[in-house]
Amino acid sequence: MHQSDPTGLHRVQDDARVLPQAARRLDTRPELWPDEVRIRVERLNLDAASFRQLEQEYHGDGGAVRDAVLAIVADRGKMQNPVTGSGGMLIGTVEEVGPESPLGLEVGQRVATLVSLTLTPLVITDGLAGWDGRSEQVPCAGHAILFGRSIAAALPDDLPTGLSLAVMDVCGAPALTARVVEQYVARGRAPRVAVIGGGGKSGSLALAAARAAGGARLIGVVPTDREAAALEASGLADQVVVTDARDPIALRDAVTGAGGPADVTVVCVDVPGCEGGAVLATADGGTVVFFSMATSFSAAALGAEGVAADVTMLVGNGYVPGHAALALDLLRTNPGVRTLFEERLA
C-alpha cells in the first residue's frame, strides 16, 4: 500500500484486509507515512488481564514472562497477548511528527498513548533488561508508531510518571461510568452503583466518578479482606463486600445484601467468569458496563438471555472524549483514589 490510512491499515502485513488490532503482524519500520508519529518508548503498561495470564502461565517466573513478552512483540510487531487478545499502552517521547499528522503533537513532548498496544506498531531494542517480569509496568527502550486516528495525551508535570501511566491506562472506565450515572440523574433518579473489582485501578476511579456524577449508593466488591480494608479506608464506597465474583449467586447476594440490586454495575476485574453474577446483581432495566478484557461477551449476552434479565450491557472501549483529563482530575482531588494507586504501585 503506497498511501497511508488514518486507521493504520497500511501497516497491516496480513493477506486479509483487516484493521491493525485484528492483524496478525504489523509493519514496524521507523520511517513515517505523512500522517504518522514516532514515539521513543520509555515504559509499557501491560493490561491487567494480559499480565495475570502470563504470570499464571509461567508460574510467577519473571524471566519467563519477560521472554514471552519479547517473543510476542518480535513475532507480531505489537504487544498483543495471544491468549487474552489484549495489550496495554505506553509512554514515551515524541521523536518525529509526519507533516500531515492531525494529533497536534510536537517533537520532544512526553506523552502517553491512549490507544491499545494491540494495534500499535512496536519495536523493543533493549531486551527489556530493566524489567524483572513481575509488574505490569515495563521499563523499555524502542520505538512505536501512532496513526492519524490514534490518541495521545501529554504527561502532566505535577504527577510521577508511573502514577500518570497507571491512571491513563484505565481512564476510559471512570469517564464512561460518569456518563452512565449522569444519564440516570438527568432522568431524575440517582442510581445505585456496584463496582466489581472496586479496589483496583479502574474500579477505584469508577467509584470516584460515580460519586462525583451523583450516584446514590456505591457498593464496592472485592475478593479479599485485605482489599476490603484498603477500599474501606479510602472512603470511596458506601459499603464494601468481599466475595468471589466468579460465583454468580454469591455475587448477586452480596450486592443485594449491601443495598442492591444495582442500577449500574461496573465490571473491572481481570479474571474471566464474572459475567453471570454481574447480570444477576443488576436490577431490571439497569445497566452493566464491562471494562475487563477478561470478559466473554458471548457469555454475558447468552447468560442474560438465559435468566431473562432485562439489562443493557455496554462494552467499555477505553475511549470517551476528555477521559484522560477526567481521570487525572479524580486522582488529584480524591485522596482515597491516590492512596490506592500509590499503594498498588508500591
Image: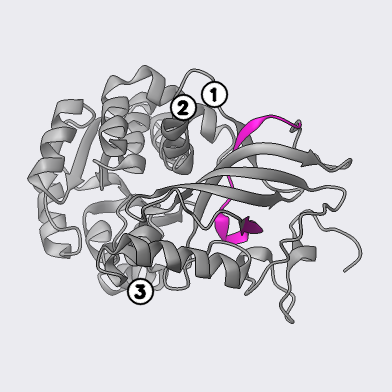
Q: Name the residue carrying label 1.
A: 156
User: Which residue is outermost to the bottom?
Assistant: 15
| Callout 3 amino acid | Leu
Residue 158 visible in the current orientation: yes
Give the label, 1 or 2, closer to the camera: 1
Alpha carbon separation for disc pair 3 and 2: 36 Å
Q: Name the residue carrying label 3.
A: 302
Determine if the magenta segment contains residue 48: no
Highlighted magenta segment, given as a residue range? 107-123
Q: Name the residue carrying label 2.
A: 328
- Pointer 1 with pointer 2, Cβ within 8 A: yes
Residue 166 or residue 124, whichever sits in front: 124
| Callout 2 amino acid | Leu
Quadrant, the N terminus? bottom right
- Pointer 1 with pointer 3, Cβ within 8 A: no
Alpha carbon separation for disc pair 1 and 2: 9 Å
Badge 3 element: helix
Residue 215, placed above or below residue 286: above
